[in-house]
Image: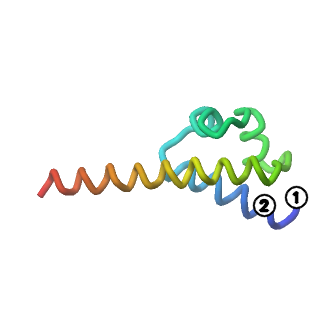
């Protein structure tokens, strides 16, 4: 796999795990097949740039939501 795709693969997998989304949830929100996402994360296929961009957008939104949830939880504990 080319280095750009490999970096995208690693970034998407790590972001997905941090966001708390499973592969099905991410694939569904991004409009990408779950099998394609799994194959991509495991380095077996390349995704089109548009698919990568959509995954990154969904992950960005999910990470923002998670951060907001954590901030709210912190405020409630105070």
Q: What residue appears at the point 73 percent right and 48 percent down from the top-left corner?
A: 41
Q: Nearer the viewer, residue 45 or 58?
A: 58
Residue at image mark 2: 6
Judge from the rendering whether residue 15 lies leftward or rightward of residue 71; answer left or right. Answer: right
Q: Nearer the viewer, residue 36 or 50?
A: 50
Residue at image mark 1: 1
* Helix, strand or loop at mark 2: helix
Lower sequence index among marks 2 and 1: 1
For marks 2 and 1, give the CA distance.
6 Å
Q: How is the image coloured?
A: rainbow
Q: Is residue 36 above or below residue 13?
A: above
Label 2–label 1 contact, CB within 8 A: yes
Residue 10: give x, y in percent of width and height. 68, 58
Residue 14: give x, y in percent of width and height. 59, 56
Q: Classify 10 Å Cα crowding around label 2: few (below 14), some (14-19), many (20 and above).
A: some
Judge from the rendering whether residue 20 lies leftward or rightward of residue 10; answer left or right. Answer: left
Q: What residue appears at the point 11 percent right and 58 percent down from the top-left corner?
A: 78
* Helix, strand or loop at mark 1: loop
């Amino acid at each position: 796999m080319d280095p750009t795709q490999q970096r995208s693969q690693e970034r998407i997998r790590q972001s997905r795990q941090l966001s708390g989304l499973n592969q099905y949830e991410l694939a569904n929100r991004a409009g990408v097949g779950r099998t394609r996402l799994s194959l991509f994360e495991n380095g077996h296929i390349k995704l089109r740039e548009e698919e990568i961009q959509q995954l990154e957008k969904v992950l960005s939104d999910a990470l923002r939501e998670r951060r907001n949830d954590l901030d709210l939880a912190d405020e409630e504990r105070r």
